[in-house]
Image (spheres, rainbow, N blue to C red):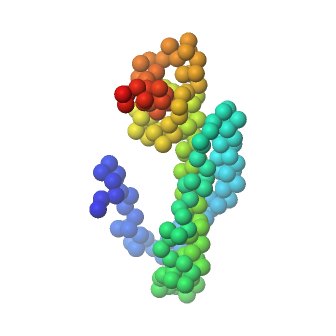
Amino acid sequence: MKACDSCQRVEIGKNHRKRSVLMRAIATPLVYLPLLMVPFILFSAYTCYFHLRLSGGKNIKKWGDFIPDRASHRYDLKSQVTMNPSFKLSPAQSKLYWIFNCTWYCPLSVALFEWHAYLVKVIENWWCPFEHDRKNEHYQDGAIDQSFWHIYPKEASKLQEDDLNNPIWNDDKESKNED
């Protein structure tokens, strides 16, 4: 099974063990430095969320909508696999280390960034219904009923045809296209 047709895979597995133990030891704690940024990212995401709500937005997904169900995780503390340590104090031999990373840190972080990206896409579709080369392909998960421009018919008439009739920010066109 291929991950996706258009993806170029990142090569890390082929190179990891070729790195020195020192380099890998330096790299490992770097993954946790973004935890220091979580309060700022949360602030930014919730600012976007409340901007949309105060602007009249409804049916806006919440952070929790992006968090995987706990029951979908393969391991719990009892069954968590660990690695044989490459050195005596390696955290890879601790079940708590893997549970923290794989059950909390990674899923919540990925969910937070996906939620934040979704909110920014909704905001862009609301304020800027102007097509660019990545918008139709990458902004569909932030589709809205109408853009700011579309709620003002005189202003909407200034838009180019592709911007005026794009179903990502104009659901009138989506329903008419289905007929």
The quadrant the N terminus occupies is: bottom left
Residue 95 found in image quarter? bottom right
The quadrant the C terminus occupies is: top left
Q: Is residue 61 left or right of residue 134?
A: right
Residue 56 at x, y percent in the picture: 66, 33
Q: State the residue at coordinates (55%, 45%).
A: 117
Q: State the residue at coordinates (58%, 47%).
A: 61
Q: Vertical placement of 10 versus 54: above or below?
A: below
Residue 129 at x, y percent in the picture: 51, 27
Q: State the residue at coordinates (39%, 72%).
A: 18
Residue 144 at x, y percent in the picture: 53, 34
Who is closer to the viewer here, 138 or 9?
Answer: 138
Q: Vertical placement of 15 versus 75: above or below?
A: above
Whether residue 21 is visible to the viewer of this picture, yes or no, is yes
Q: State the residue at coordinates (40%, 32%).
A: 133
Who is closer to the viewer here, 120 or 70?
Answer: 70
Q: Vertical placement of 28 versus 138: above or below?
A: below
- Residue lying furthest front in this view? 179
Q: Is residue 85 left or right of residue 151?
A: left
Who is closer to the viewer here, 29 or 161?
Answer: 161
Whether residue 28 is visible to the viewer of this picture, yes or no, is no
Residue 96 at x, y percent in the picture: 60, 79
Q: How many marks?
A: 0
